[in-house]
Amino acid sequence: ASAAATTIGTSAADALALLLQEDPLLLQHGLNLYNGGFVSLSDASGDDNHEDNPDDAAYAYAASLLHDDGSSAPSNNGGWMSSSGEYRQRATEALAEVDRKLALVESLAQRVSRDSPEKVAGPLLRLHGFELSESSESPSRNNNSDVATLTATRDKADRLERQSQVLSTVALRVETALQRGVTRMESATTRLSRVLELSATLKMILRLQFEARKLGSGLDLESISQGGVIDLRDLTRAAASVAVMEDLLSHPSLSPANQEGSIDVVEKLRPGAETVAKSVRQAAAGLMNELQSQSTSATVSSLSRLGATLQVYFHLGELPDASWRAVSSALATAEKASSHLFHPTAVKRMKESAQSEAMALAEVEVAKSKEGKDDFKAKDSRQRKKQLDAIYERLYIRKLREKRTAAASKWATDVSDASSRVWNLHRVLAARNDPVTRKNFLEVVAESVIPKDFAGAEEALLQAQNENKDIENVTDKLNIQDFSLFSLFWVQLCLGLAGRLQRLLKYDGGSLESDVALLYPAVRSASLEMVTELHDVMQMGSASVDDTNGLSSMGSGWNPTGVMGGSAVLEDSVFLGGSVAMDGSLDDPFGRADEAAGGGFLGASADAWTHPSSTYDAALDADGSRPAADVSHLPSSSALAVFSSQEWVTLQGERVSDGEPMGLSPLRTSFLDQCKKRLFTPLEFMFQEAVSVDENGVAIPVLPTLPSRYDIAKIDSNIREELSLADPRQGGGDFSMATMISDPIVSMVHEFCVLAKRAISEIDEDERAETEAMAHNLKVASVMSSLASFVGNAPENTYVNPYRPSQSPQHEEASHSCRVGLLPALQEIESLVKDTILTPLTRVLNSQVATVMSKMHRSGAYLQDSRDDGSQASSFVQIHLVDLFDNIATAYLSPLPNEYASIVASTVATFSIYSFVSNAAMIRPLGETSRLRLTQDLADFELSLEQLVFKGGTSLSLSQIAGGKPYSELRAMRQLLFWNMLDDKTLSPAEVAKALLRETWVKDVRPSTLFHFLFSFAPTLLSSPHHFKRMDAHQYVGAMIKLDGSVDDGEASAWMTTMACCDAYQQRESVEGSMADGDRRVGAILMILGPELLRRRRQ
């Protein structure tokens, strides 16, 4: 029993509390009870009278652990424990020993569970009474297998530990053996690498000595160092050798860190190599500076030298730096020229110089007048002072214009020189390839980092490049195939120019803005000439390169090699588009710009039509006429190419992105603002409100004050003065500014029309035309006519008339473009006068005519028979209309200008004809006497209208008004009066209608006129249309004919009324048929004629 208890205690030490309370194995053996000794299995199973005390069971279990395996079991009386205290002490010590053993067991169990968990889980489960397999075995057998498994596991772990120690010892011995081999190999490899390094060093020394001998044999160092004549081939070879030597000398093997490891041979060659390198760089820099300082007329030799110099820099590895330095130098030159022109001091000095020179010349001119003219001596001091001021003002304007033109020309020349240098550098880079690497020089520069000085240009070009692209296609670097040094230079120049102009315009609170703005005409003219020359050079260079060698302007493709692999195109005169003289200069490098641009032999240069040519003015025949074949100076396509080129668009700042100004855009904006300000100044005193009071001091309404002829003349003078700024001889600008200056003039006219509209009085149709308001409106129309005349004639008076009879096509073209630009102003004036003055006037006059026409029915003018004494009644036209037309012509047409009087006369004549014919057609009954009298009045009426139209100031006759339709109807009315087809009673209505439609004059008569005329033959039962509508005749005619003379809308209503009358007649005829007294066929004829006449009129 003691052996079983000891085995159980040793196996289950890691779970004492659980085993004591819940472990079925302890319950089975009865170890949870204590009765003074260990209970056997049989005793535990058979005794049920002892107390269950967990603490006693725990102490019994601890006592069993303390019992030695070799000793005998304790006695039942507990004699080996003398007291309870000793019992508890030994039990406590036993439990502590159990804890230590539990810790050891746990660590071993964790290690074994990691290696073989399946061998640990099963025995532990079996130990605690959970049978997983072989349930038929006895508990004791299971316990023995569990103990054996744990012991075997521990032994296995020990064996593994010993094996690991053995393996570690073996690995250590192997590593030691391998380390000895590696050490020997490293020693051998180090010796071999030193041998190879020494061999490479010897090779570099030999190469260094070879390059040194090359430099010493064929290169004149003294000539290079002293700046003498340099052979470019020798310099190129020297640069290649210097590049190799510098690369070798910078190698770590030949440039040790301390002096002890230095190589004597290398150190002896180093000073000479450094001296040669310095001389080569000095020579290359000198050549670059010399080439960059040359004028714009580049020669073939200079371009070849530039290509060789770039080849030197390529060998030295400094090609991008040298190119960017050259471009930066050109940009600094251009910005310096801009700073000299666009500077407050320069503007003030220019004005002061012009004032002093003008005053000196004015005094000289006045002194000459005193000596030569007696009338000058007779003038008082005030008149002489006034004359001196006038002379001074004239000379001051001329001198100031000359100063501005000279300053702008100098600025354009400097900028053109800098731009030409950059363009020559760009195209040489694009056309040059390295003979060894086959790299294009421009691509080498494009791959380098763009300097910070051109950051603004790079950003602008990137924005233009990424414009209209998807997000995934947006890049942050310029495309190499589209890379252009000239574009970066030009955009950066324009950005700097715009910033400088903005600062100048804001200087001292804008005190110099007006003077600076007046620089624009001269600057634009000079810049146009500059861009034209640049465009011609660029077109010639790109065309010759493309045609000769298949190269694009960006240098793509293969180049035939020249000196040291340079492009052979640089040695060809075709590259510059001109022949080469003996001294290497080009013959007329800009003479065939248009031929290169596709203009042919008759193409004119871009500035040939913007600047007057003295040779052209002299090319006249003996009679002063222009030769018919002389068309070379007309605007050609090359001028349009210049204005649409990116250089011109960028310089003018016409395409501004994100609100950032570019080029001359601030100056142009300020110039237009100042033009508008000068033009708007006289408008402050136009159409001022007048104030008047009566005798009691009460304010009475007064019409606004109208501008005088002097005020309108002042506006004309201002318009011509502003337009003259586009004349090279008068304002220093160029003719292409004419359209631009037209915009402020159009704005001024618009403002003038707004003021005039406020001054126009409203006229009602019922108001009589002889009112003061109508007379005031007629005066306003005269003012607007004068303004329109001045605006329309301003282009010709400014650009053509001063040069007659020797005006050039440039002047004609400028005048034409200016007239086109001023058309909106003329149209606005005409629209204002028509809508607010002429239309109300014609409506009032036509209303008066309609009132007089109504007397034709009220007085029965054509219903009276001939008098008893045989005399005829007076003519209706002579009594009522002749005086009316004379009054209209005298009171209204005479005050109006001819162009407006003709409109009023035409409208009144049209309305009068339609109204007279319609009223005459509605006379019922119409006898023979009435027909004769009406025929006579038609002749008098036509004569009166002819006089009215003639007094209206128009050259048109009555037959040409409104397309001739009113006059044709007036003439056809005479034939209609004597139509007698109804006299034949045998004809059916259809036959009468067909015969009437075949008449030649039917097409000229309105359907309503024919309808109403046929009513005069109808029976009494067929009511007239105006009687059917319960209206007077003149009211019915007024519904058909509008007061503006339009008649199309009334024809349909007249036909509807006619059909209603015919329907009513048919109903009456069915009831009172025997009482009919007229021709009963009229109703049927009307129903047949109506649809056909309306169809013809619609066609």
Image (cartoon, helix red, strand yellow):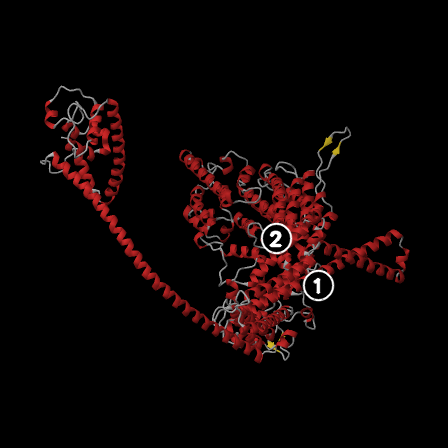
To which residue does mark 2 refer? 823
Instruction: Please name whichever residue, 443 or 178, is drawn nearer the observer in this view of the structure.
Output: 178
Residue 502 is tagged as none
Q: Position of residue 819 (x, y in %)?
A: 63, 56
Q: Position of residue 905 (x, y in %)?
A: 63, 48
To which residue does mark 1 refer? 803
Q: Is residue 97 above or below residue 499?
A: above
| Residue in the picture at 53% in, 60% down | 449
Q: Position of residue 293 (x, y in %)?
A: 65, 68
The image quadrant where one finds the N terminus is: top left
Instruction: Please name whichever residue, 361 or 718, is drawn nearer the observer in this view of the structure.
Output: 361
| Residue in the picture at 25% in, 48% down | 161
Res. 111 visible in picture = yes
Q: Position of residue 483 (x, y in %)?
A: 52, 62
Relative placement, left or right, of 599 versus 776 is left
> What is the three-letter code of the residue carrying label 2?
Leu
| Residue in the picture at 12% in, 35% down | 140
Which secondary structure lies at badge 1? helix
Local crowd size for mark 1, using a 10 Å CA cut-off: few (<14), some (14–19), many (≥20): few
Total numbered circles: 2
Q: Would you identify the image quadrant in which residue 213 lies?
A: bottom right
Earlier in the chain: of badge 1 and badge 2, it is 1
